[in-house]
Image: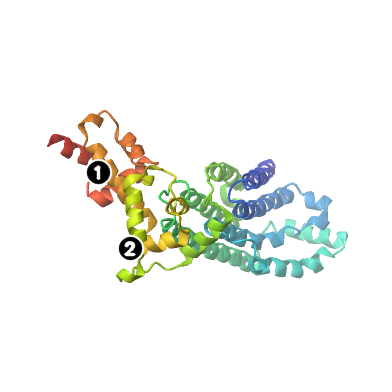
Amino acid sequence: MLINAISASSFFYLAFVLLVKGRTTNRLANRWLAAFVIFVGFLQLGDALVISRTYFQYPHFYNVLDPFLFGVAPAFYWATFHFVQPSRQFNKRSLWHFMPCYLIFLLSIPDFLESKAEKLALLKVLEEQGQVLGPVGIAVFALIFLQCVVYMVLSYRQILQHQRNLKKVSSIQDGTNLQWFIYFLNGVAILLLFWIIEIIFYTNFLDGKMSWIYWLGTFYLGFYVIQQKEIYPFAAQELVEIAAIIQEKQVINSIPSAVDEVQKGQLLRLMESEKPYLDPELSLPKLAQLMHCSTHELSHLINQGFERNFYQFINTYRIEESKRLLSDPKLEHLTILAIGFEAGFNSKTTFNTTFKQLVGMSPVEFRKRELMV
């Protein structure tokens, strides 16, 4: 019972951390994620109350936490949704996803209204049965499992789409591409698997020690929670424009009249003279300010005029800069990582991956080839 209580309190504390984090970072997303963690904590709390026979002392609390079972999956999905949607605010339509919670609550009202004697009698019967699931219980848990799987697949698709959309507005991916959230999602999937195993085998599996796994899971989830950065650190108006950009399907138009050639030349001169790509935090709104145009206009110019997204456009310049630095014998004392940072990259992995994609060899191989000539 003690480990169940500790596990529940750990989930509640993790929810508190998310709410505090949400005051400054990814506000709405972290609030939904906190709701998800609280609902999971309720599951552990329910187990603790059963094992400690607390319900026999306070029978009116029995089944009070059951409706939250169907809130776990949609809460997680809406957390994902608001991580990847830069300007979406809370919408009442979101609550429709919690319809199963409302239905379970309505169906449970007669049980809530039962007398203390009736509830004690039910608890004694359940205790004598040894927590064996009946057909109704199996059906309920099967529905919960199916709901979790569906929402996790939808969440994973949202993240992959976000990683593609991010390249339209940002020149960096590390910290904002939600890779940490994929690890978080994978951890949730593993905990879900253990929960299903526990339901199938019930108290026989691992001699009731499954809560140790859930408790350790809170440390794993918490580790990735504290790593998150603001996904779209832009002003409100910029977020509206960015939202419009990422919702557009990228269509490359080769017709010259579709591009303002004067503006295109202005952008090329800016890139050559001021070298804004050396800023590792360069974003589409930042470059638009330098160009004295709207974010949407600049996005259109890059997509149509250069047949690239923003990420490709900026990193092409960074790779050319890194090639120049790697070929300079006077800079041979600099490490590959230092060269990447000098060229505007903010991580070794991104630098190496992008360099190999565009040049066909690693930065190390390129430097050896150039300095041997």
Could you tell me which residue is drawn at 33 percent across and 36 percent down?
337
Residue 17 x/y as whole percent? 64, 43
Tally the numbered discs.
Answer: 2
**In the picture shown, does residue 28 fall above or below 351?**
below
Dot 2 falls on a residue whose secondary structure is helix
Front residue of 166/245: it is 245
Say whether residue 28 is visible. Answer: yes
Which residue of the protein is positioned furthest toward the front in this rendering?
Answer: 262
Which amino acid, by three-letter code, is at mark 1?
A: Ser
Q: Reading the chain from its start, which is encountered first: label 2 or label 1?
A: 2
Q: Which mark is residue 261?
A: 2
Which residue in the structure is indicated by mark 1? 362
- At x 66%, y 50%, the residue is 41
Left or right: 107 as drawn, with respect to 114: left
Residues under labels 2 and 1: Cα distance?
35 Å
* Amino acid at dot 2: Glu
The answer to whether residue 307 is visible is no
In the rendered image, which quarter is residue 114 located in? bottom right
